[in-house]
Image (tube, helix red, strand yellow):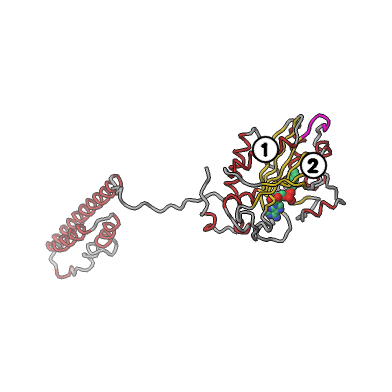
Amino acid sequence: MQDLMEQLSQDLHAATTADQVEQIRIAYLGRKGTITTLAKNTDFSTLSPEEKKEFGQKLNDLKNRATTEINKAMESAKRSLLTKRKTREIDLTAPGNDRRLGTLHPITMTQMEIEDIFEGMGFSVLAGPEVESEYFCFEALNIPSDHPARDMQDTFWLKNNLVLRTHTSANQVRTLKRFGAPVRAIFPGRCFRYEAVDPSHENTFYQCEGLVVDENISVANLIAVMKTILSEVFRRDVKVRLRPGFFPFVEPGFELDLNCLLCGGKGCPTCGDGWIELIPCGLIHPEVLRHGGIDPEKYSGFAFGIGLTRLAMMKYGIRDIRYLNAGDLRFNEQFLPIF
Ligand code: FA5
């Protein structure tokens, strides 16, 4: 029995965790433990009554000592765990855990920048639905169902005369009806067109519509705002050209093209002839103002539809629009925030 006690002490000495001490308790005092089975494995028939009594006392004594030792070892294992936790050493020179930081998508960054610039000029930033009624997307914009201009935008039709909006211009009449005049707002958001995808055309892309309605608004105001936007976004001189453009909801209408920043205007697969169609715009057609409940005799206004996706491409030097929707993080991670 003395040997057993010594063996137990050695085992407990080697144990460093509460789990290990518990394993030792089971090995010695558990149902099939060495001490527990000691009585079973002893042949009492060879012992005198005094010897039996003495054996019983020694066995009890052994059990008590073993229990005390094991309890002590358990206490100390728990205590050392606690101290370790409290005084966990911090090695300031150790390399940190590598945390993967996300980056903003180039379109998101461009949108945020555009919003900041327009807010600085007193515009509100609003949003409209992506699933739009045929009325707001076309009819209220002077594009009735039999008008050839419907063919300008290949449309995803849904049920019940709903469409996936083909342009953010669908917000124009919604806004006029809701806020009246004077009003100054932009509407960045996704648009959808059923069209063949190539380096500069996607079926899902972003535009940023803007409109200003007030008394005495003219083309001069429109051009001043467009110039401010481009100089703020690119922070350098960029070449633009303004040419007449037809949109049934503006009169007169313009196309504002940007000299391609990818090829310097020489012509490339992204732009074709050296110019990127970027911001169609014009003075809001009186009929559209009427749809919005605005008196065209008193108020006039301008509207524009920035191709936000293409602007991001020019800003970040992205040659193919398809990278932007591909969801490849290796692509997205190349662009650092611009603020
Ligand atoms: C429109 O969508 C008009 N609503 C713009 C407008 C607003 C005119 C207000 C007048 C007044 P357009 O179809 O040209 O026009 O598209 C506007 C811009 O969106 C284009 O110049 C281009 O930059 C971008 N865009 C159009 N289609 C795509 C496409 N499939 N992929 C990427 N960008 C596109």
Amino acid type indicated by mark 1: Val
Q: Residue furthest front?
A: 266
Q: Position of residue 171 (x, y in %)?
A: 73, 42
Helix, strand or loop status at disc 1: helix
Q: Residue at x 53, y 57 (%)?
A: 329
In the image, the residue with mark 1 has its CB under 8 Å from the nearest atom of ligand 1: no
The residue where tag 1 is placed is 225
Residue 182 vertical placement versus 171 (above, below): above
Measuring from the top left, give residue 8's x and y in whole percent: 19, 60
Give the residue displayed 21% in from the left and 52% down from the top. 68
In this rendering, would 21 be left or right of 268? left
Query: Where residue 166 appears, x then y in whole percent?
Result: 74, 51
Foreground residue, 52 or 304? 304
Q: Nearer the viewer, residue 42 or 70?
A: 70
Point out the stretch of residues depicted in magenta: 295-300
Residue 179 placement: quadrant = top right
The label number, if any, that marks residue 250 in the structure image: none
